[in-house]
Image: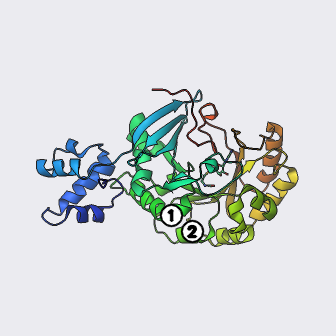
């Protein structure tokens, strides 16, 4: 299989070119990949013809292909992208008035067995490379003209997969996405979400370039969390909160906790009060997500009044927002990414 250029940092491009090329060639290619965002280096007329041909053959840019697009009535678009090995993964674009959010995947499928999430039903197929993570952003941006105004663009690593179980590639992709001489998306506009892989949270905190951190809490007690998210039998709630307390937040940053509300399971006022107590000494806010249902998911969505009551309790102590479901009709909402069929578009 040919080795893709996308995903390489400047030093790696330099190495790949080998001796016999002037120093500035690597930078030219880096700029073409991440700043001009070409799909094919044959388009870069400033490169010598022989090199263009070589790079167009043995080494390709390596953007994924669009296998299918699905368009929601609410404007959300779900993309099924085909990777170099033929596997497919999903990326979601959520356009809003003030901003566009691209939700990208970090793995094909997911090894974390959360009982309310459809991606869990896929199991893990493989990790994505840094190039495949960056490629999702570049492709969806190109398909929708998004990077013209990069101040509108937000990236959330909340698609398929557990990003912190693919941390090296996620961090490398973050460096490539944030580099001002490359894609140029500020780190504060990128968020990574984790089910709570504690040692990896500590590792992420040591990275000089890292996205914002969001943590899927999803329960107010250790017992319930272990039931809903079996991986937390290994990564306990109290240790998670201690890692959150120690996490080196930047001056502009808060931790976000996501909490999926399951009717009659974790959505009572008592749960809300426990959430407040758990997060009391953290610089945190909470995003509530009423369950997005789907085939194979044995839970129900709470009524809006229940969600509002939960929010009202948490909001007395910290920021607490209700995440509006996007793309429910095309299986694009949180927890629905499982390559589900829907009427295609485009
Ligand atoms: N594995 C990471 C990244 C996925 S983010 C993580 O767990 O954080 C996906 C978010 O959607 C998580 O906060 C998860 O709790 C939430 N979620 C999963 N299934 C859901 C569903 N069916 N309805 C609503 N939210 C869900």
* Residue at the extreme right of the image, as rendered: 270
Which residue is more in the foreground, 95 or 78? 78
6 sits left or right of 114 in the view = left
Which residue is more in the foreground, 98 or 55? 55
Instruction: Answer yes or no: is residue 201 visible.
Output: yes
N-terminal of the pair, mark 2 or mark 1, is 1
Which residue is more in the foreground, 41 or 112? 112
- Exactly how many numbered labels are in the figure? 2
Quadrant in which the C terminus is drawn: top left
Residue at 76% over, 47% down: 261
Q: Position of residue 176 (x, y in %)?
A: 39, 57
Q: Position of residue 255 (x, y in %)?
A: 63, 60
Protein image colouring: rainbow
Which residue is the site of mark 2? 200
Q: Residues within 10 Å of mark 1 (few under 14, many from 20)?
A: some
Q: Quadrant of residue 341?
A: top right
Instruction: Answer yes or no: is residue 99 visible.
Output: no
Which residue is more in the foreground, 334 or 147? 334
Residue at 22% over, 47% down: 56
Question: Is label 1 within 8 A of ligand 1 (CB to nearest ligand atom)?
Answer: no
Residue at 77% over, 58% down: 227
Which residue is the site of mark 1? 167
Q: Are marks 2 and 1 in contact (CB under 8 Å)?
A: yes
Q: Residues within 10 Å of mark 2 (few under 14, many from 20)?
A: some
């Amino acid at each position: 299989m040919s080795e893709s250029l996308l995903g390489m940092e400047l030093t790696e491009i330099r190495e790949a070119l080998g001796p016999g090329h002037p120093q500035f060639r690597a930078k030219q290619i880096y700029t073409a990949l991440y700043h001009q965002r070409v799909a094919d280096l044959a388009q870069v007329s400033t490169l010598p013809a022989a090199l263009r041909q070589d790079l167009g053959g043995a080494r390709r840019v390596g953007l994924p292909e669009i296998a299918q697009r699905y368009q929601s009535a609410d404007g959300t678009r779900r993309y099924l992208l085909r990777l170099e090995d033929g596997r497919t993964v999903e990326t979601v674009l959520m356009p809003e008035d003030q901003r566009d959010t691209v939700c990208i995947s970090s793995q094909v499928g997911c090894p974390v067995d959360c009982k309310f999430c459809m991606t869990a039903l896929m199991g893990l197929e493989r990790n994505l490379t840094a190039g495949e993570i960056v490629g999702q952003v570049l492709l969806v941006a190109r398909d929708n003209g998004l990077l013209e105004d990069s101040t509108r663009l937000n990236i959330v690593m909340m698609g398929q997969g557990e990003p912190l179980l693919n941390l090296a590639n996620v961090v490398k992709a973050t460096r490539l996405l944030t580099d001002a001489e490359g894609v140029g998306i500020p780190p504060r506009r990128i968020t990574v979400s984790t089910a709570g892989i504690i040692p990896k949270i500590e590792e992420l905190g040591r990275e000089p370039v890292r996205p914002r951190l969001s943590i899927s809490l999803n329960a107010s007690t250790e017992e319930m969390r272990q039931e809903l998210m079996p991986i937390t039998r290994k990564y306990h709630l109290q240790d998670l909160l201690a890692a959150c307390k120690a996490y080196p937040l930047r001056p502009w940053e808060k931790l976000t906790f996501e909490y999926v509300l399951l009717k009659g399971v974790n959505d009572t006022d008592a749960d809300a009060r426990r959430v407040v107590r758990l997060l009391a000494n953290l610089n945190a806010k909470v995003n509530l997500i009423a369950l997005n249902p789907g085939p194979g998911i044995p839970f129900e969505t709470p009524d809006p009044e229940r969600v509002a009551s939960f929010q009202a309790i948490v909001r007395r102590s910290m920021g607490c927002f209700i995440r509006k479901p996007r793309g429910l009709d095309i299986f694009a909402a949180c927890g629905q990414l499982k390559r589900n069929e829907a009427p295609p578009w485009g």
